[in-house]
Amino acid sequence: MRLTGHTSRTSMALLAGCVSALTLSAPTAWALRTTVGGRTIELDGAAEIREVFETNRATGHDRTLETLRVRGAAQLTDWLHLDTSTVGVNGGPTFQATKSGTFNLNDTFQDVSPAVEFEEAYLDAHFEAFDLQVGKQKFAWGKLDRQQPNDLINPERFVDPLLQEEDERKIGVPAIQGSYSLPARDWLPDDSRFTVVYAPIYVPYRFPNPGERWFPPAATPADVFSVPAGLFELGGHPNPAFSVPVRLQAINAAPPARQFQNSDWAARWSGVVRGADVALYYYHGFDPTPAFSAAAIAFAPPDPTQLPNGITAETLLSPVFRTIDAYGTDAAYTWGGFTFRGEGAYVSGRPFSRDLRFLVSNPSVLAPQIKAGLIAFAHGIPEVPIDLGTSFVVHDAVEWGAGADYAVDGYFLLLQANQTDVLHNDIDLLIKNVDTRLLANLRKNFLSDDLQAQLIGVYGIESDYSILLPRLTYRITDAIDARVGYLFIAGRSQSVGGQYKRNDEGYLRLRYVF
C-alpha cells in the first residue's frame, strides 16, 4: 500500500489526533433543537475524515478527504417546513482541483476543492391528503438495494463511486413534487398514493477528470498511436512506421437549453395489494447514466519536412445528454423474517458507451484518414479532424432485478440479482447485451452492537468481474465511530467493474455525529 513518506505519516497522526481529541472532548453527540416563536428549529450533522491507502502506486492518488455535512429543519407554520442539507468537502480523489468554491449545475467535469454544496433546500407543505415539496431535492424511488431501475430523477457524482454511499453520490435537482393520497374505495388498493415530480432544468452527472483515480480506463486511449510500415501507399511508396503522441482532454458540453421541452417528468402510483407494497412508474427526461462522444484532432509538425514524424494528436471526450422514456414497476413483500423485492423497467432510447480505448487503437481502420491527413499536412493544413466512429449507441433496454433479505439473531443477509438486457444490438459495448450482476450483503453486530462487521460483494457474470468490500465499524462513543475497510476489484479489464482492477485500496474513516 502507498503508506510511505511525510504525507502518510501526517495523515495517520491527524487521524490519531482526531480520535483522541473527539473522544476526550465529546463523549456524547450534540444537536441544536430550539424554538423561536413557538416554532421548532433543528440542526444536526456529521464530520468525517478518511484516509485511503492505494495498493498500486501507479494509480491515481486519493488525498485525505474531510467532509462536513449539516442538516437544518425549521417549522415555519403548522403545515409548512423548510429542510436543508449542506456539505463541505476537501480532498479525496479529485486531486487535480485547482480552485475552491461551489459546484455549478452545468458542468460534468468540475473539480472544486475545498468546496461547499447546497445538496438540498426545499419547502415541505403537508395538508390532509396532499403534500407539496418545492426546491432542490433528492429522491429515492425503487425497492432494490444499490441498483434501482426506476430511480432516475437524480444524477450522480462518479468521482468516488465505490466508497461513497448511494445517497452521498446523488446530486439534488430543482424540482416540484406533489403527492396525493387517494380516498379509500373498494376498487382501489389500500394506501393508494399518486406522486408527480417536475424538474424544470436538467442537472448533468458529475465525472472525474482524466488522470484522476476513478476516471474510467475504458475512456482512456493509449498515449501513443503507432502506425506500422506499409499500411498504405504515399506518393507511390509504402509509408514508413511512425508514432503519434496522443493527449486526452475532457470537454464540458453545454447542458440542454433551459426550456420547457427539456424538463424532466416523473410519476409514481403506490399502494398495498394483498399485503405487498407495489408501485408503478413513468419517467420522461434525460438519462442519468453517463455516456460520452469521442473525437480526435491530428496536428501537423512545426516543420512539414519532418513528416510523418512530429505529428501529435488529441482525443476529445465530451458528455452526451439524451432523453429517455422509462416504464417501470416494483413490489416488496414481508414474510416472517424475510423481505422479498422485485423491480423492473423498460427504458426507451438509452445511450450505451463503447470501450473508447479501441476507437483509437486500430491503425488499419483509420488508414484512409491517416493517409488523407498526411497529404493535408504536406499542403500546409495545420490540423485535421479524425472520425473515430460511433462512441455510443442508442437502444431500448430492459432493466430488472429481484432479491431477498433475512434478519435473525443479529445477522442480516441480503442477496440480489440485477440484469440489463440491451435490445437489438450488434455492436460491442462496454457491457454485454445480457449483463447480470449478483449482489451479496452480510453484516453482524458484536460487543453489544458497538462493533459491526460487514461484507459486500458484487459479481458480474457475463462481464466477469468481482468487487469485494469487507469493513469493520466500531462505535467509540455515542457520537464517534471509526471504520476500517478494504476494496478489492478483479476481472476483465474490458468490463464496467474490471477496468478498475488496479484500484485496490484500504481505507480508514473517522466520523463524528452531532
Image (tube, rainbow, N blue to C red):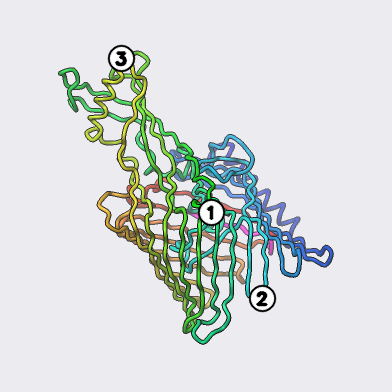
Q: Position of residue 360 (x, y in %)?
A: 31, 36
**Residue 306 numbered mark, or none:** 3
Question: Which residue is at the front of the view, 151 or 238?
Answer: 151
Residue 146 vertical placement versus 405 (above, below): above
Q: Position of residue 389 (x, y in %)?
A: 30, 39
Q: Which residue is mark 1?
A: 169
CA–CA distance between discs 2 and 3? 79 Å
- Residue 512 seen in render: no
- The quarter of the displayed image where residue 85 is located: bottom right
Task: Characterize the magenta stretch by its predominant secondary structure.
Answer: strand
- Looking at the image, is mark 1 or mark 3 earlier in the sequence? 1
- The kind of secondary structure element at disc 1 is helix
Q: Quadrant location of the C terminus?
A: bottom right
Query: Mark 1 and 3 residues: CB-CB less than 8 Å, in contact?
Result: no
Q: At label 3, which amino acid type do we have? A: Gln
CA–CA distance between discs 1 and 3? 49 Å
Query: Mark 2 and 1 residues: CB-CB less than 8 Å, in contact?
Result: no
Q: Which residue is mark 2?
A: 128
Q: At label 2, which amino acid type do we have? A: Glu
Q: The magenta stretch spans which residues?
A: 477-487
- The quarter of the displayed image where residue 475 is located: bottom right
Q: Position of residue 15 (x, y in %)?
A: 63, 48
Residue 490 vertical placement versus 36 (above, below): above
Identify the residue at horizontal 76%, vertical 63% (top origin).
Answer: 76
Identify the residue at horizontal 68%, vertical 60% (top origin).
Answer: 123
